[in-house]
Image (cartoon, helix red, strand yellow):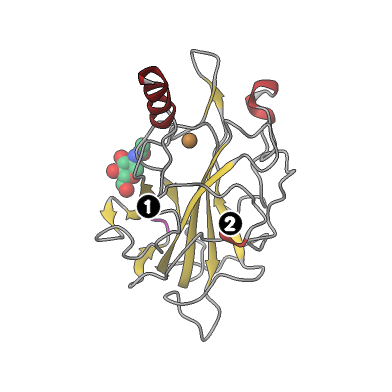
Amino acid sequence: MQILTSLLLAAATSHAHYTFPKLVVNGKPGDDKDWTVTRRTKNADTKQGVENPTNADIRCYSSTNAGTVAEVPAGATIHYISTQQVNHPGPTQYYLAKVPEGKSASSWDGSGNVWFKIATTMPTVDANKQMTWPGQNEYKTVNITIPKATPDGEYLVRVEHIALHLAMQANKAQFYLSCSQIKITGGGNGTPGPLAAFPGAYKSSDPGILVNLGSIQPSAYQPPGPAVWSG
Ligand SMILES: *[C@@H]1O[C@H](CO)[C@@H](O)[C@H](O)[C@H]1NC(C)=O
Ligand SMILES: [Cu+2]
């Protein structure tokens, strides 16, 4: 009995999951506290990831909207604080969606063909010959830049980390994500795209989602979703 208990404990602790409750903008808090401008996710307590990328939860996984909107200058560096170590292999991606005329970042649901990708990450092989990604084993997500050419206005920003350690089986990749309510200032005249919808952008069979990391070269990894818009 004792042996069984310690085995179960070991399994539980080796499987830490995470949420991203705090946006950081140019080194300063975007969220004063957890879930201030970032929409509280359904897994805030359980830390369970989304497994089916065609489920509605793939958009923001949110249970409630957030109270305020953070001001983010175009060209700013952003990242998220993670509640646990981001210990699984897999890419980190960031998306933006512009809030339509007449709607507000505090309440808009992010539906429609509105999301464009502004950053992704690619793997390398570490000293133990394991595929590893930028930001892996950190307590925060990778830094990225809001493109200078992004037009001014209110947006939702969506961060995701896709854990691929079990991804050789369909619907076993785990998506950890959250969305924050922001207002971009000092931006440009770019035309962001290509645009995609969540759900819609991903299929369970995408080669970056249904993938055996042991059988591909790092450079062959294909992050799911549209191409990156870099401004
Ligand atoms: C990430 O950006 C923050 C400012 O927001 C900076 O303090 C930190 O050094 C950056 N980290 C890396 C690895 O570039
Ligand atoms: Cu895990």
**Callout 2 amino acid:** Ile
Q: Nearer the viewer, mark 2 or mark 1?
A: 1
| Element class at badge 1 | loop
Q: Residue placed at 33% from the left, 73% from the top?
A: 67
Give the position of the C terminus as an image quadrant: bottom right
Residue that badge 1 annotates: 45
Q: Which residues are magenta?
A: 75-79
Give the position of the N terminus as an image quadrant: top left
- What is the quadrant of residue 122 in the picture? top right
Which residue is at the front of the view, 107 or 99?
A: 107
Q: Residue placed at 25% from the left, 59% from the top?
A: 33
Residue that badge 2 annotates: 58
Image x and y of residue 171, in percent: 66, 43
Residue 172 vs 99, above or below: the answer is above
Image x and y of residue 124, in percent: 55, 25
Image x and y of residue 6, in percent: 37, 22
Left-right relation of 170 to 190: right
Which residue is at the front of the view, 119 or 64?
A: 64
**Callout 1 amino acid:** Asp
Q: Residue placed at 67% from the left, 39% from the top?
A: 208
Residue 66 vs 92, above or below: the answer is below
